Amino acid sequence: MGLLVALLWGGLACDEGGADGPSSIFESTPVCAVPGHAPQLRVYPRLDVIGPFGNALVSGADSMWIVESGSNTVSRRSKSSGVLDEGFVDVGNDRNPYGIFVDEAVGELFVTNFAANTLTVASTRTGVVRQEISHPSFKNPSGVVATGTTIYVVNVNYLGQAEGYGPGSVSIVDRASLEVLGSIETAHKNPQYVTRLETLDGPRIAISNGGALRFGSEGLRIESEGSLELWEETPSALEPKIVHFAIGQLAHPERGALGQAMITADGRFIYAASGISPVLFKFDVANKRWIHASNDPLVLNAASGDATHAGALDARGLLYVTSFNQDALYVFDTACDKLLIGPIDLGITGDMLEGPQAIALDEQGEQTDAYFIMSVSNAIGKVTVAF
């Protein structure tokens, strides 16, 4: 599924590498927010072999949760012991699991099944599947997030190469009863990502509408507008307060396909990577406007051609962005909106594409571990950032 997702969407000193040591060490420039502090980055490219076509990665208290689309499983890996529980959750044959939300405090996780049009509910403690929910509103479900009362599932609704994308939507599920209450159409097509953000205005459900994409003779191109939607929950799950902000990608079809929304620790700014180009977008929460949209994005690199990116933002304001087609990591400093370091090579196979598909962070005081999964070479690795 990692491949399908890609369609839908300093100095260097080398070590010997190996299971216990990093393959490479990088020294970055100083961090803007903390003058004089220049983190050291150590790359561990292959901590474990995982199931085929890893597609999503979530960081828990002591576990990294890995969605493996090719094997229809979710594995978990202990951060402290390094033990990998392969296929901890088996969602069933021909499901093509895509996105995941994990609530370890409650002891449950939710997995969207892109091909089967279902939502799996499983135990984080035992891995046992409690229920698989089917409903007509599920149309290639991709992202999923849950609040205390409600589960939100975004539906890509991909109809095929000839027809392209149908209208996107969000299925609304009551968390207590697991009843699907209904669905709400999104402002634009292809809503691949949904998350919960703590903004200046309070908690919001953030939906990234990537817009319709199509391959042609010139590569992957935009066919419709994309946008960021912010939903405020109300007592009625089917009546959230919704605002949306178009990104302007129709006028700049080579720069769009909004990725997962990420918010700074102060709740002031939302960042998102692009699903098709090496750029970042930035939204001003207080003033309800794009600072950097498709017409003027923040540039990671000058690479040409299609490029799928995934990101994760830490409490210091450092944004870690993987580049699928480069097997690389970039670290972007949001305190000054400048590239801190990159590209950092994450692969071990030389010229063969390995494809970093997802990234998740484990922050531990003066150290951050940025875990990543390779969708093509079926590996999990990490970059340790020491301040």
Image (tube, rainbow, N blue to C red):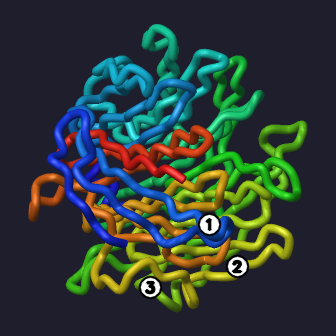
Up/down of 240 relative to 302, above or below: above
Q: From the top left corner, tell me how far across and down residue 192 is, in percent.
A: 50, 54
Q: Amino acid at mark 3?
A: Pro
Q: Amino acid at mark 2?
A: Trp
What kind of element bears circle 1? strand
Residue depicted at 43% across the width and 27% down the height: 79
Residue depicted at 83% across the width and 44% down the height: 233
Q: Upstream in the sequence, badge 3 or badge 2?
A: 3
Q: Is residue 381 left or right of residue 166?
A: left
Q: Which numbered disc covers residue 236?
A: none
Residue 1 in sight in this render: no
Q: Is residue 353 left or right of residue 13?
A: left
Q: Upstream in the sequence, badge 1 or badge 2?
A: 1
Report crowding for label 1: few under 14, some 14 to 19, many 20 or more residues within 10 A (C-alpha).
many
Q: Which numbered disc covers residue 271?
A: 1
In this rendering, the label closer to the viewer, 1 or 2: 1
Q: Amino acid at mark 1?
A: Tyr
Looking at this view, name the residue that lies furthest to the front. 36
